[in-house]
Amino acid sequence: MTVRPARRVPWPLIVLVALASGCATESETEPAAEASAPMAASSTPDIAGRVDEFTSWIEVDLDAIGANLEALRQHTGVEVMPVVKNNAYGHGLVPIVRYLAGQGVERVFVANVQEALELRQAGIDLNIVNMGPLFTDGQHMRTVELGITQVVFDDGVVQRLSDAASAVGQDASVFVKVDTGLRRVGVFHDQAADFIERAASLPGIAIEGIFSTFMQTPEEDRAMLARLLAVETDVRARGIDPGLRSMASTDAILHFPESHLDLVRPGMSLYGIYPEEKDLDAGVTLTPALSLKARIELVKWVDEGDSVTYWGRFIAPRRMMIATVHAGFYDGVPRELANVGSVFYAGEFRDIIGSVSLNHVVVDVTGTDASPGDTVEVIGHAGPNAVSAIAETANWMVYSLLNHLNPQTPRVYYQGGEPAALLEP
Ligand SMILES: Cc1ncc(COP(=O)(O)O)c(C=O)c1O
């Protein structure tokens, strides 16, 4: 089995990462020197100075992510492979992985090859497992050249990786996705051992592991686990080492200890979110890491009976002071929060009144001395504007909320309570 050695990536006090999104070209895959970032904040006051200019921004508490990682390690006792797909669930891919590398994480899980390339381009050297498909010869070559582990369940892809391995002169690592009943992606479990045997026989193919995804239905999940373990037994009987075995994401990490096997794959829990109410009793303390902040743009008075926002969605029941806050559904604020959401401002939760616009929400700030430039917490860590509470109010999944945050919104990273890094796409 070829496994890249974990390398600790230094976490500089200040890193301003400005990366083009999308697929890197061959010449772009060289590690990007931090010095080549177009702008560089050089101190905490510099970051604070940049933040003063933002209309909306996301704050990420890296210490919370570190604490969640440790809690998950303690709870499972096995390797934790953070799921950093989809821009690290909105937290910002490169800064999060750079931080995780410094916490001893050996491998991370990305959604597609573009994310894998973005990490390599940023000089990140830990194992990257790509669960997304490859289509072109160039993608297969680059995957091998850059030491990215590819999720496989198709003979054609394994053959192309083997060809690329021969051309490049280094092994292609693969993680085999077994379909144990979800029927989404993966080689069906009753064909998996044959597939793995064929893959292992090809030159340059190194099997790093086998994994599957639960349905998250307890009765079905037990049968699914048994199917993955049967594949392992069959493969071993053929004299092949299947490598790491993995089944559990957050739900099974919290509720199905027998499924932890060699490697767990947390997404939500790493970011400090309990996806469901029942998760609160699982005995794992998680701390949310992300908040969305925005500035008040305008404060004004409206009279009783005045309508506020599109379609007159809100009619003032009395004379009110209202603030227009510069964050809306462009930033990822659900439109369903119209007239029912809350933000935190001046020590209290304040009602969102009227519709949520592309770039604005309007908030009742009666009784405050609100003024333009003041900061409002649109998404927070507790109470009615916490991620789970917003998702419930909006009737969204918590997953949708984090994964709809705009990647263009600047992100500020805190360590020890101080701004430590800034991501300004
Ligand atoms: C294959 C796989 N493993 C793990 C996860 C992480 O799931 P969770 O966020 O529930 O921990 C995901 C997320 O969708 C996934 O697709």
Image (cartoon, rainbow, N blue to C red):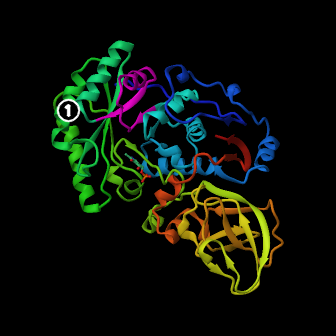
Q: Amino acid at mark 1?
A: Phe
Using the image as rendered, state which of residue 365 and residue 300 is in the foreground.
300
In this view, 233 is above or below 323:
above
Q: Mark 1 near ligand 1 (CB under 8 Å)?
A: no
- Name the residue at 57% across, 57% down: 332
Q: Residues within 10 Å of mark 1 (few under 14, many from 20)?
A: many
Q: Position of residue 103 (x, y in %)?
A: 57, 39
Q: Quadrant of the N terminus?
A: top left
Q: Quadrant of the C terminus?
A: top right
Element marked by disc 1 = helix
Q: Is residue 228 visible?
A: yes
| Quarter of the figure with residue 191 | top left
- In the image, is residue 47 part of the stretch drawn in magenta? no
- Name the residue at 58% across, 34% down: 20
Q: Position of residue 84 (x, y in %)?
A: 49, 43
- Name the residue at 72% across, 36% down: 13
In this view, 203 is above or below 424:
above
Q: Residue furthest front?
A: 311
- In the image, is residue 130 part of the stretch drawn in magenta? yes
Q: Position of residue 220 (x, y in %)?
A: 24, 58
Q: Position of residue 242 (x, y in %)?
A: 27, 33
In this view, 24 is above or below 406:
above
Question: Which residue is under mark 1?
Answer: 195
Using the image as rendered, state which of residue 395 and residue 263 is in the foreground.
395
Is 78 displayed left or right of 412 in the figure?
A: left
- Residues drawn in magenta: 128-152
Using the image as rendered, state which of residue 243 and residue 292 is in the foreground.
292
